[in-house]
Amino acid sequence: MIEWIIAASVSYVVYRALRGETKTNSPINNETVTESFKFINLQYVNPPQNKIVLLGKTGAGKSSTCNALLGKNVFQTNVLHGATDVVFSVKYKNTYELYDTPGLLDGKILTESVLNTIQQSRIVVYVTDRQLYRPELAIVKALSSKQKAWNAKHSNSSRHLLLYVNQKDVWEQTMAKSEIESHSTAILKQVSEWIDPKDVAFGASAPYKKGKVLQPEIEALEKLITKYLV
Ligand SMILES: Nc1nc2c(ncn2[C@@H]2O[C@H](COP(=O)(O)OP(=O)(O)OP(=O)(O)O)[C@@H](O)[C@H]2O)c(=O)[nH]1
Ligand SMILES: [Mg+2]
C-alpha cells in the first residue's frame, strides 16, 4: 500500500510538472491535524436548507467541480493552491444554491463561514483527487456521525454526505488500469465506515490533455446530487 501511494504521488507530481505546475502540497503537520478536529464542534440545530456545499483539500478541484456542475465558468480556479479564499455561492437546480469553499489543510483553518455553510447545507460533497489524508478522514467521520445523529431524529429532513473523487483523467494518464482499480478500491475502503459506496462518484471536472482543457466528466456526481435534491 505504501509503495503504491508513493508511486501514485510521484506520477502525479510528474504529471503536474509536465503541465508546468510546480507548486505542490505542503506537508500536513500536527497543527493542521488539530485544526481539522474543530469539525467535532459542528452542531446541527436547525433543519437543512436547499444548499449544497463542496469541501476538500486545497487544489482537489472544488471550484472546477462547481463550474462543471453549472456548465459555465463562474468560480475562479487556479493551478496554485488557495485560489478560493472566501465562501461563494451561486444558484443551482431546483432552488438549490451551490457553495464553493476555501481549501482545507495546507495550514488553513476552518472558518466560521465554512462551518455555518456546512450546518445549513442539506448536501455536503467532500472532494478529493487521491486517497484521503488522516485529517480529512477525521473530517469525514465527524460529518458523517453528526449527519447520522440528525437523520435518526428527523427522517423528513435528511442530510447527505457524498464523496467525489476528481481528476480521473490524471489517473488515466499516469497509472495502469490495475493501479486505478486498486486506487479506487482503497478510497472506497478508507471511507466505507462513513460513506456508502453508492454515495461515491468518480469524475474529471477539468480534464486536460495535450495542452487542451476537455469537456468535464461530471455525470456520475450530477446523478448522485440529483437523487438527493428535494
Ligand atoms: N487534469 C485535471 N485537472 C483538474 C481537474 N479538476 C481540476 N483540475 C485543475 O486543478 C487545479 C485546481 O483546481 P481548483 O478547482 O482551483 O481547486 P480547488 O479545490 O478549488 O482549490 P482551492 O480553491 O485552492 O481550495 C486547476 O488547475 C484545475 O484546472 C481534473 O478533473 N483534471
Ligand atoms: Mg477553489
Image (tube, rainbow, N blue to C red):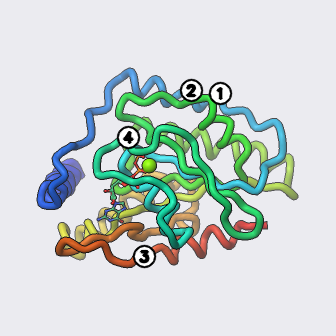
Q: Distance of mark 2 from mark 1, alpha carbons?
A: 6 Å
Decide if ligand 1 comes within 8 Å of the CB at mark 3.
Answer: yes
Instruction: Using the numbered discs, state the Cα–Cα distance from disc 3 to disc 2 in whole angstroms.
Output: 33 Å
| Mark 1 → mark 3, Cα distance in angstroms | 35 Å
The picture quadrant where one finds residue 14 is bottom left
Element carrying mark 3 = loop
Q: Which numbered disc, 4 or 2, marks the residue that appears first in the sequence?
A: 2
How much space separates mark 4 and mark 1, taking CA atoms? 24 Å
Other-residue count near label 4 (Cα within 10 Å), few / some / many at <14 / 14–19 / ≥20: some
Give the mark nearest the N terminus, 4 or 3: 4
Helix, strand, or loop for circle 2? helix
Left/right of residue 125 with respect to residue 145 in the rendered view: left
Residue 89 against residue 178 in the figure, above or below: above
Quarter residue 184 falls in: bottom left
Q: Position of residue 42 (x, y in %)?
A: 67, 32
> Label 3 belongs to which residue?
217
Instruction: Using a 10 Å C-alpha cutoff, classify the residue at mark 1 as few (fewer than 14 neighbours), some (14 to 19) or many (20 or more).
Output: few
Pick whichever, 126 or 22, lies toward us.
Answer: 22
Q: Which residue lies under the disc numbered 2?
A: 38
Q: Amino acid at mark 1?
A: Asn
Residue position marked by numbered label 4 in the rendering: 82
Is label 4 or label 2 in front? Answer: 4
SS at circle 4: loop
Determine which residue is flagged by label 1: 41
Q: Distance between the Cα atoms at labels 4 and 2?
A: 20 Å
For the residues labelled 2 and 1, say whether their Cβ atoms are less than 8 Å apart: yes
User: Is the residue marked 4 within 8 Å of ligand 1, measured from its CB?
Assistant: yes
Give the numbered dot on residue 22.
none
